[in-house]
Image (cartoon, grey):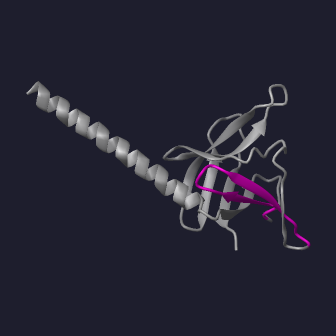
Amino acid sequence: MKILRTLKINLFLTLLLLSCQGEKKELISLFSGIQGKKWNYYSIDGQHDFYPYRVYEFFPNGNEYQYINVRSTGKLEKIPKDDLYNPEKWSIINDSIVSIESKKNLTTGYFIKQNRKILYKSRDTIILQATKSEDYKGIIILTKYK
């Protein structure tokens, strides 16, 4: 009886683990593509215009590029890697938390991840919100770029 109970628990934990891995793959596929997937970045907090000044491009291997969307020309200019807010990395923390932004600690030189909770996701729109009280308190909306 005890062996059967242990087997049931092990089966449950295995299925749970496989389910989480499936969700992670789904999120990687949603955010990124082999050739990169670009998203308009909207910051909703009362201090920013609704125009997407930044465009983020995500790749499945965790690479990320950020661009400035020049309003006058409509062209994208890549932000250099050594920018204070651009480590060129993104990651999935769990099935509802992602890190698409980081800020460089000027004392240590290391980047500190800024985690975001996924509030909504679809094929062409992702809505995120900060997970810690000291982080950015607004809403971030990602919409598929052209």
**Horizontal relation, residue 12 to residue 31: left or right:** left
- Is 88 rendered above or below residue 71? above
Picture residue at 66% right of the left edge, 65% below the top: 143
* Screen quadrant of the C terminus: bottom right
Q: Which residues are magenta?
A: 52-72
User: Where residue 66 sits in the image (x, y, percent)?
Assistant: 77, 55
On the picture, is 39 further left or further right than 91? right
Q: Position of residue 96 (x, y in %)?
A: 52, 47
In this rendering, the answer to whether 103 lies above or below 108 is below
Q: Is residue 120 magenta?
A: no
Q: Viewed as shown, does residue 8 lie left or right of 123? A: left
Q: Position of residue 105 (x, y in %)?
A: 80, 31
Depth check, front residue: 57 or 9: 57
* Residue at position x 68%, y 38% in the image: 113
Q: Quadrant of residue 58?
A: bottom right
Residue located at (64% from left, 65% from top): 35
Number of numbered discs on residues: 0
Q: Quadrant of residue 77?
A: bottom right
Of all residues, the one furthest to the right in this rendering is: 72
Between residues 20 and 131, which one lies in front from this camera angle? 20
| Residue 102 on image: x %, y % | 73, 41
Taking the spot 68% from the left edge, 46% from the top edge, the residue there is 89
**Nearer to us in this view, 90 or 53:** 90
